[in-house]
Image (cartoon, coloured by chain):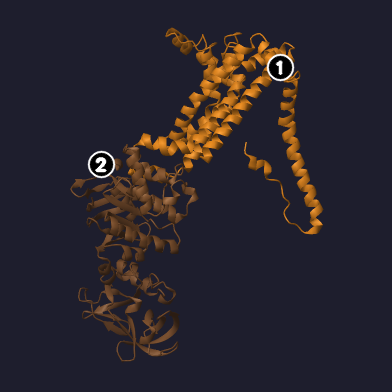
Chain colours: A orange, B brown
Amino acid sequence: MSGAAQTVGIRSVPVRSKDRTGAALRHLGLRGAALIYLGAMVLVPIAAIVTKGFGDGLTSFRTALAVPGAWPAIRLTLLTSAVATLINAVMGTLLAWVLVRYRFPGRRVLSAVVDLPMAIPTLVTGLMLLTLYGPNSPIGQALEGVGLRVAFTSIGILLALCVVTLPLVVRQVQPVLLELDPAEEEAASTLGAGAWFSFRKVVFPAIRPAIVGGGLLTFARCIGEFGSVVLISGNLAGKTLTAPVFIFQLANQFRPAEAASIATLMFAISFVLVLVTARLLARRAEA
Amino acid sequence: MSMPIKVEGLTKHFGSFEAVQDVTFTAAAGSITALLGPSGSGKSTVLRMIAGLEQPTAGRIWMGDDELTAKSVQERAVGFVFQHYALFRHMNVADNVAFGLRVRKEEKASRDARVKELLELVQMTHFAHRYPDQLSGGQRQRIALARALAPRPRVLLLDEPFGALDAKVRQDLRRWLDELHRELGVTSLLVTHDQEEALELANQVVVMHEGRVEQAGAPADVYNDPATAFVAGFVGAANVLHGHVVHGHVHLGTFQVPGADHLEEGAAVAAYVRPHDVRVTEEETGVRGRIERMATLGWLARLSIKLSGGETLVAHVPHDELGGAKEGDEVWVDLRSPKAFGIESDSAGSAASADPVNGQGVTSPVA
């Protein structure tokens, strides 16, 4: 995202002349290896998706939306992702705050637990959720008794998304909170500011970029989430079928062009989102 | 409106560490009181307890007739200036200064007027739209001061306000703070480890050491009449000579000085003598010594004198009082107003070996 990282070239360190050729080769080798790896792993697959999706130009967006069931799937994915992002932006910030500001027994263990959702294979997470909230589980039945159905509904999807993306905002906000100078908040309190006023005016502006950054990662991860969702959502077309699962189904049904067109649309949405947010953040920083 | 500050029996324990022990003093309304001590002496903790940033383990705090001890930091309405400025880095200068006014929901018009007034006071009018990271250290501290003063606090608490600045800026800001205080007359407490700063700015100096008050008094009293050996050594430079009491006199090796009537016969003593209280004379009084080294500091000569008894003294003598004495010359040395303090006999041996020539015996250089 930052331009600086791209403009910093690798400059050769001054060396004695007999070493110069070797050094140049070494730099060329390192640079080449890094770029080839990045290209092979990231750029080529993106290019493949885009050429496949945009094979007939921008009409492919129309094609994508014309696929029966595509629009409901995309809408469901965007909606659940947005809500999950909001929830985890708030709860992740709260978690980071508690982990940084409070001393209590088990704090270190809790801090390690935060990373678990990222470490556990997502399919396992999905299975856990289904076992916990499924129609055959006591919890699932109890919730259903009060009219709240989790499994095979959009609430189940939301739950899965929230679980797997939980660490993202926490891990963005936590280091920033740690680096805050406590004297700034003390200064606010000597000037008469209560805890909430001080949080809004002093702490929040400092952690806002981290919350937004973590939120972006969360959203990006949500709109592509497959493993944890596929079991708990039930995949009912038009109701609980998310875009990634739909793409998977299309690909399995030998309809790769349609799959690619929807994938490209999802890709374009997240790409635009990233650009817009980066732009907003940059303007905030200048102001 | 300026208020006196009174603290009584103030004590603070951090776990088993006794940071502040039974501190009592009064800062008169409109005065500057300096809390002076080495780092770890508890002076900042006292200041933070007065501000309400730390809760005392015991003791009480008053501002005028208003007891603050149980009040929250927000209710105390003190102005606090931090060593590292603690400016709000996401706000520009004007918003920083306006913060305390905004908290009290003051109207924008009166807020803007007050901000303008304070920026003029600290001579930072042109920097209203800058951000803290675009200012120098001295400028930041001036803004921090303006921010603390904006809500018209009853007292101003300054925690090592010049501690992070370089020497030249320190001097300028010190003089500037002095003028500002004369103009505003707000009761101020200044925490510092710099004795020169304390002596120059304060009406009252409270010397702290290991969490306790060693002495509280006017700067001249603390300097000329130190109450304890620690004060004698910490405030101003001093030679330390070791000896013992004989008939109310301190016997220091080969010679003796009066002023030990308050001490027991035979007690081990440390006598503190300021470098400018060492006289070099042609009269045959005092004790013989040899000028080992002589450095010229402008109108003053800095001498290292080895006494016939083996001790070495640092002396600051005006050139015109030297009478042409040079390095290597034998001279007579007389000590004006030495301050004698009884010491524990077991610590005397190690302390006596301190070498005053290299500054270990002279606790701080005189500028």
Q: Position of residue B105 (x, y in %)?
A: 32, 36
Q: Residue furthest left?
A: B65
Q: Which element carries disc 1, helix, strand or loop?
A: helix
Q: Quadrant of residue B174?
A: bottom left
Label 2 amino acid?
Lys
Give the residue displayed 23% in from the left and 49% down from the top. Answer: B61
Q: Position of residue B259 (x, y in %)?
A: 23, 77
**Can you see residue A60?**
yes
The number of discs equals 2
> Would you place residue B193 above or below residue A184 in this image?
below
Q: Where B92 sits versus B337, above or below?
A: above
Q: Quadrant of residue B207?
A: bottom left
Tell which of B367 and B104 is nearer to you: B104
Q: In the rendered image, which residue does mark 1 sit on? A: A60
Q: Residue at x 59, y 8 (%)?
A: A238
Q: Chain of mark 2?
A: B
Neighbours of disc 2 within 10 Å: few (<14), some (14-19), many (20+): few
In the rendered image, the quadrant that contains the N terminus of chain A is top right
Q: Residues within 10 Å of mark 1 (few under 14, many from 20)?
A: many
Residue type marked 1 = Ser
B301 up-or-down from A15: above or below: below
> Which residue occupies 38% across, 54% down?
B122
**Disc assigned to residue B71:** 2
Subunit that carries the residue with mark 1: A
Q: Secondary structure at mark 2?
A: loop
Residue B343 rendering spot, x and y as whole percentages: 29, 70
